[in-house]
Image (cartoon, grey):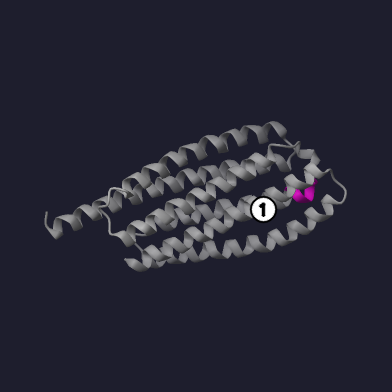
């Protein structure tokens, strides 16, 4: 088989993988949306709403996992240039981490009655969940335009980095509030509050990691 044929096959497979990667991001956006709905319910002290949204988060995260496995399987066929394959694997794993940390935040929030966590802490978690959803939406848009407008893709990736920096600042404020809350709460509520904030911050960190991968793919084109 000639080099031109191999090149054509590699390009076709790469485009198919990018389509699956976009589907992976779409499902991750759905995870982030369900997670935001959960923290909206938590802020309202709606325990039933928290439970419903937690179930939704787990269902959609499971579907996202299936798409991630399809991406990895496709990349394992060996038709794509090794450097491109490595970057696309990094993309799949970074997006997978976003969903995993959101699932972790949702699971922790469902472990406790909402009123056991003070308003201020619940509101910080809500603000962070809003930022995560916005970051995932920007990542999805960045991948959509990656083959059409590299400048736009990079601008969207830069916007994700700015959101991550904002969340870092929110997390510092939130941890201060969590520490004050821990001084007057039960140990279990203190632990859950801290882990919710950490999981949401970790999800945003993985959004930045994903943006870095998108930048890397863009530079190679």
Is residue 121 rendered magenta in the image? yes
**Is 103 contained in the magenta span?**
no
Is residue 96 among what the camera can see?
yes
Question: Which residue is more in the foreground, 115 or 6?
Answer: 6
Q: Nearer the viewer, residue 117 or 127?
A: 117
- The residue carrying pointer 1 sits among few (fewer than 14), some (14 to 19) or many (20 or more) residues within 10 Å by Cα, namely some
Number of marks in the rendered image: 1
Q: Secondary structure at mark 1?
A: helix
Magenta region, main secondary structure: helix
User: Going by the picture, which residue comes out furthest to the right?
Assistant: 184
Q: Relative to the observer, which residue lies in front, 27 or 77?
A: 77
Q: Quadrant of residue 220?
A: bottom left
* Horizontal arrangement in the rendering, residue 2 relative to residue 18 (left or right): left
Could you say where residue 108 lies in the image, as x and y percent from the top left? 67, 41
Tell me if residue 117 can be seen. no
Residue at left 48%, top 54%?
94
Disc 1 target residue: 198
Quadrant location, the C terminus: bottom left
Which residues make up the magenta segment? 117-122
Q: Position of residue 62 (x, y in %)?
A: 49, 37
* Residue 24 vertical position relative to residue 212 in the rendered view, above or below: above
**Location of residue 192 by image quarter:** top right
């Amino acid at each position: 088989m000639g080099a031109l044929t191999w090149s054509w096959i590699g390009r076709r497979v790469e485009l198919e993988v990018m389509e699956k990667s976009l589907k992976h991001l779409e499902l991750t956006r759905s995870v982030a949306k369900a997670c935001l709905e959960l923290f909206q319910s938590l802020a309202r002290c709606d325990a039933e709403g928290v439970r419903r949204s937690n179930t939704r988060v787990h269902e959609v995260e499971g579907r996202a996992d299936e798409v991630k496995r399809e991406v990895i399987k496709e990349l394992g066929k060996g038709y794509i240039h090794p450097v491109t394959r490595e970057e696309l694997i990094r993309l799949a794993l970074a997006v997978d981490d976003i969903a995993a940390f959101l699932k972790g935040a949702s699971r922790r929030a469902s472990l406790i009655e909402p009123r056991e966590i003070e308003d201020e802490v619940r509101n910080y978690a809500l603000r962070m969940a809003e930022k995560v959803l916005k970051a995932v939406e920007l990542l999805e848009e960045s991948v959509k335009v990656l083959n059409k407008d590299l400048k736009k893709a990079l601008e969207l990736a830069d916007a994700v980095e700015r959101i991550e920096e904002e969340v870092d600042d929110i997390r510092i404020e939130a941890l201060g509030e969590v520490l004050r809350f821990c001084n007057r709460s039960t140990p279990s509520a203190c632990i859950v509050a801290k882990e919710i904030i950490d999981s949401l911050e970790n999800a945003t960190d993985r959004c930045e990691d994903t943006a870095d991968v998108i930048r890397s793919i863009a530079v190679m084109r």
